[in-house]
Image (cartoon, rainbow, N blue to C red):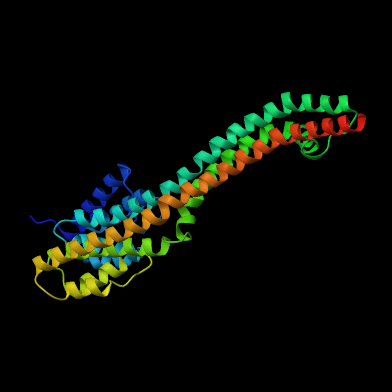
Amino acid sequence: MPESPTQRLISLNDQAIAILRLGIPLDLGLGANCERQLRQINDILQFESDSDHTIETLLARQSLPERYVSVARMMLATDDPAPIFESIASQQLARDAASNPFRQAVIEPFVIAGLGYLGLIFLCSYTLPHLEYQYTQQGQVPSGVTKFLMTIRDAMPIWIVAFPILMIVIWLVWGKFVKQGLMNHIPGSGPYGRWLVAESQAKRLSAMVDSGVDQDTALSLATTSVTPHTPVRPIAESIVRSGNGESRRRALNRLARFYHFLAEDRRQTYFNKAPALIGMFFAAVVVFGYALATFVPWIEVLSNLSGLGSMQQ
């Protein structure tokens, strides 16, 4: 007995849940807790499976997100849903891969800042008393960088505890900010996102064309299956509307590979090099600041000694 559309969608949702449990992201437009939402949809579909309603009616009655409805309709219309799952997962995986260099860019400054933190403790606990002794021997009052370091030492009970807490907070906020906000505002993020969308649409069109889905339906579903809704690019639409099934499938697959190449080019140009330079800059600032805090006070002491020697002569 052939599987009903309702039972097939339940099976497809179960497959999506299994994929999510493997740690593979699937953005189906169902929010953060996608797995729980899919289970709830399956419960509703299972309850309604014996009714006379069509799958389209059942989906419309539940007020489900349009993105999920479009993806569900695509998977039901195709003979093999694997390309649809792959197009959804690959888009999110590509975005995660692009954000990884930004997450990692903070590691080097954090390591340097941690070493600077330990060095500052040593500076305040061991080096600064020797500097104060030199000023006492010279009968002078500490000034400049030495006075600034003494102020920092006086506040040591505060920052020695606050610094590790601050680093943990920055680490957590940075990871969340990079994932949610930064990737949408850095140079090159716009074209990168558009090429990923175009690639996923081409893959989905290829799967639908290969299964004999109506041209207008395929183009409409490809448009509404991405967020925000993005019209299919003219070249992809032209391929869908011309040629036979096999030639269109091959052409769309080649087009998807081309869009993937363009997205990778953007990623290599903007997302791999820029984070390393940013991390290197902040690490250099920390090293430079610690070097000044270490050597400038001794230069001041030596300068004072030189001045005293000149006065005695």
Rendered location of residue 272, percent (x, y): 41, 50
Residue lying at 64% horizontally and 30% vertically, measured from the top left: 119
Which of the 4 image quarters holds residue 18? top left
Rendered location of residue 179, percent (x, y): 45, 51
Task: Answer yes or no: is residue 28 visible.
Answer: no
- How many numbered discs? 0
Residue projecting furthest to the front: 313
Residue lying at 26% horizontally and 64% vertically, measured from the top left: 201
Task: Answer yes or no: is residue 144 visible.
Answer: yes
Which of the 4 image quarters holds residue 218? bottom left
Q: Is residue 151 left or right of residue 238?
A: right
Q: Is residue 254 left or right of residue 175?
A: left
Quadrant into which the N terminus falls = bottom left
Is residue 131 shown above or below 173? above
Rendered location of residue 57, percent (x, y): 26, 68
Residue lying at 25% horizontally and 49% vertically, measured from the top left: 14
Q: Is residue 20 left or right of residue 3?
A: right
Residue lying at 37% horizontally and 61% vertically, measured from the top left: 192
Q: Give the camera-side residue of 68 and 90.
A: 90
Rendered location of residue 217, percent (x, y): 21, 72
Q: Is residue 87 left or right of residue 310?
A: left
Quadrant into which the C terminus falls = top right
Which of the 4 image quarters holds residue 65? bottom left
